[in-house]
Amino acid sequence: MPVRPRQVLRATRLPATFALLLIALTLAGAQPRPVTPRGPLDAQEQNNIAVFRKLSPSVVHITTLAQQRDFFSRNVTEVPSGTGSGFLWDEQGHIVTNFHVIRGASAAKVTLSDQSSYDAALVGVDPDRDLAVLRIAAPREKLQPVPMGASKDLQVGQTVYAIGNPFGLDQTLTRGIVSALNREIESMTQRTIRGAIQTDAAINPGNSGGPLLDSAGRLIGVNTSIYSPSGGSNGIGFAIPADEVNRVVPQLIKHGRVIRPALGLTAGTDQLRQVLRLPKGVVLIGLRPGGGAQRAGLQPFMRGRDGRIVGGDVITAVNGKPVGDLDELLNELEERQVGDKVTLSVWNGGKTRQVQAQLTSD
């Protein structure tokens, strides 16, 4: 049966109408959507922004350089070897960072927040506390020191901020809390850094040496390490407490090193102590002439002419507080000043005596 003309017309018009409808719907969906107004930023957001705007000019990016000798020409050039963070300490251009950031470098460059770059001079280092001080010759108007805070009155749960240059990226802000206090971490010299601040604020490679700040934007620590099974920022971050930084940095600026009270002794290893079946403490194997230990009449272990070990002294306590090894002894001495007198508990041949010794400079 032949198709009627009216039926053909209806068949061709329906798809055209449908197509027009699709075009209209598409054009309507391609238009920008109206923006939904939001209320004011909450107090936490406003403080985040305020701390970053105020403190980011005080944080610097450090690029370390290492010497490289060309195999064929024998020419020596300096090439980038690592990056880290730091912060301005004062208006004289002193910059605080971690010792491990600049360790082994032949030179360093410091980039400020305005992207101006300066050659840095090394002022002083304290490897035992993983701290170092650099200095740049920049215009004073560019030198905005970080406000100094304190770490002795911190409380678990306080808000903290970390500003740095992770992975070489330009300044980054992360926020967290004080997760724990009085942690112990190990420096590159195997000395114990006591009183470390534990935080969950993300600290990535490159954040080292940057400031840890409280909610008022004051320095409460120097970000130094992260414990993470994966190596990422999802672990536990640690910072050197501000009170320790405020004690060490002025000495580095003045002397280039920390002048510590000492007894002038050389200690044997814990393995030696165990082999000789000695009590826990500091086994003396050497004394510095004129040092406090020698003046107090202490005697080191030594070998006799027949090769046998001649018994000496083991320091087991300082002012009544037990010390199990050299690290614990040094930590006890650092709480005192050069010239102070201490009472040492000294073991020798199964007997313990009390000896008074005066501390000298190390």
Image (cartoon, helix red, strand yellow):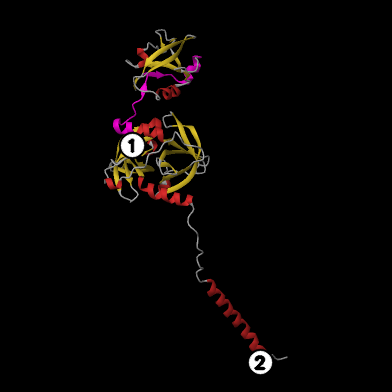
Q: Residues within 10 Å of mark 1 (few under 14, many from 20)?
A: many
Asked whether 150 or 239 is in front, the reply is 150
Q: Which residue is mark 2?
A: 5
Task: Specify the label residue 217 is tagged with.
Answer: none
Tell me which corner region of the image, top left, top right, bottom left or bottom right, holds residue 7.
bottom right
Residue 65 point in image, percent of width and height? 33, 42
Q: Quadrant of the N terminus?
A: bottom right
Q: Which residue is mark 1?
A: 133
Q: Residues within 10 Å of mark 2 (few under 14, many from 20)?
A: few
Taking the spot 35% from the left edge, 36% from the top edge, the residue there is 132
Residue 226 point in image, percent of width and height? 48, 39
Q: Earlier in the sequence, mark 2 or mark 1?
A: 2
The verdict on residue 345 being magenta is no
Tell me which corner region of the image, top left, top right, bottom left or bottom right, holds residue 19.
bottom right
Asked if residue 204 lies left or right of residue 264, the reply is: right
Taking the spot 26% from the left edge, 43% from the top edge, the residue there is 137
Mark 2 lies on a secondary structure that is helix
Residue 344 seen in this snapshot: yes
Q: Can you say whether 220 is above or below 301 in the image?
A: below
Residue type indicated by callout 2: Pro
The verdict on residue 274 being magenta is yes
Mark 1 lies on a secondary structure that is strand
Q: Label 2, label 1: how many angstroms apart (C-alpha)?
A: 94 Å
Tell me which corner region of the image, top left, top right, bottom left or bottom right, holds residue 256.
top left
Over which residues does the magenta segment extend? Answer: 250-277
Residue 287 seen in this snapshot: no
Residue type indicated by callout 1: Val
- Contact (Cβ within 8 Å) of mark 2 with mark 1: no
Residue 300 point in image, percent of width and height? 40, 13
Q: Residue pushed farthest right? A: 1
Asked whether 33 or 11 is in front, the reply is 33
